[in-house]
Amino acid sequence: MDAKIDIRALRKTFKSLPVVDGIDLAVAPGEFVAIVGPSGCGKSTLMKLLAGFEHPDSGAVAIDGVPVTRPSPNAIVISQHGSVFPWLTVRENLMFGLSGKDDAVKRATADHYAEVVGLKGFEKAHPHELSGGMLKRVEIARALAVKPDILLMDEPFSALDALTGLKMRNELLRILREERHTVILITHDVEEALYLADRVVVLSPRPTTIRSVFAVAQPHPRKVSEPALQEMKDAILTQLGL
Ligand SMILES: Nc1ncnc2c1ncn2[C@@H]1O[C@H](COP(=O)(O)OP(=O)(O)O)[C@@H](O)[C@H]1O
Ligand SMILES: [Mg+2]
């Protein structure tokens, strides 16, 4: 099958600081790839290269065979830092990124995705009236509403408390069952990676490159406490030097 995302010999240096040192990875359509790596190794830089926010010094990223040169509505980034507009309601935030002129259509799409992420009844609320977990839901809904092929998630759940994080991961899996997005998730949480992903890519310290790739074949819902997954977790932590 042709790759949805094809990363070839990707390199990036900031001034004299080499950050990404030759990454090759092909992600299949509908695949969920988690990327783990030490803090500061270049994960967010890699994500920015995939999203077209940064340009590589050499190598390339292609989506559906087309080189990425700038941000595209086909690949939406959900980052650790919230990007919800505080002056807009939930509905207005969800409508913001939608193209087209028909407000009624946009509103229906916005309300549909508010419901999908469990925010029904909060369409008219402003961000300051919502909890951290609800704000994260707004962000995910806003990303889903534009129907991107690809979700690029950079530590999206790291600011949430453990219980809310757990709920959000299950929500994400449920949504992905219905709308088959291709997902790249950056996380520092190895258990989160093993709970969600089809493959876990382990990065080296900066300048980063791929140290190893683990395929996770277990069906969902998974129990990370299961011996096979615990073994994989230990192997990944060893790769991370822990
Ligand atoms: N725009 C930039 N200009 C200069 N250095 C940067 C820039 N972005 C990131 N860096 C540097 O690149 C390295 C990797 O950063 P980052 O990709 O954010 O790491 P991670 O997400 O893995 O923690 C860090 O040393 C950081 O200071
Ligand atoms: Mg980062």
Image (spheres, rainbow, N blue to C red):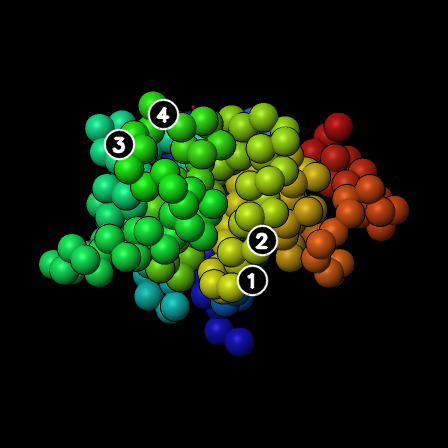
Marker disc for residue 173: 2
Name the amino acid, label 1: Arg
Q: CA distance from mark 2 to mark 4?
A: 26 Å
| Label 4: element kind | helix
Residue 116 % position (x, y): 45, 52
Q: Quadrant of residue 205?
A: top right
Marker disc for residue 129: 4
Name the N-terminal-most of marks 3 and 4. Answer: 3
Q: Check the image and report above or below for 23 versus 134.
A: below
Q: How many marks?
A: 4
Work out whether residue 67 or residue 166 is closer to the camera in this orientation and state it.
166
From the viewer's perspective, is the residue at label 1 or at label 4 nearer? 4
Q: CA distance from mark 2 to mark 3?
A: 26 Å
Q: What residue is disc 1 on? A: 177
Marker disc for residue 85: 3
Q: Quadrant of residue 150?
A: bottom left
Q: Do callouts 1 and 4 mark residues in contact (Cβ within 8 Å)?
A: no
Q: Do callouts 3 and 4 mark residues in contact (Cβ within 8 Å)?
A: no
Q: Residue placed at 61% from the left, 47% from the top? A: 170
Name the N-terminal-most of marks 1 and 4. Answer: 4
Q: CA distance from mark 1 to mark 4?
A: 30 Å
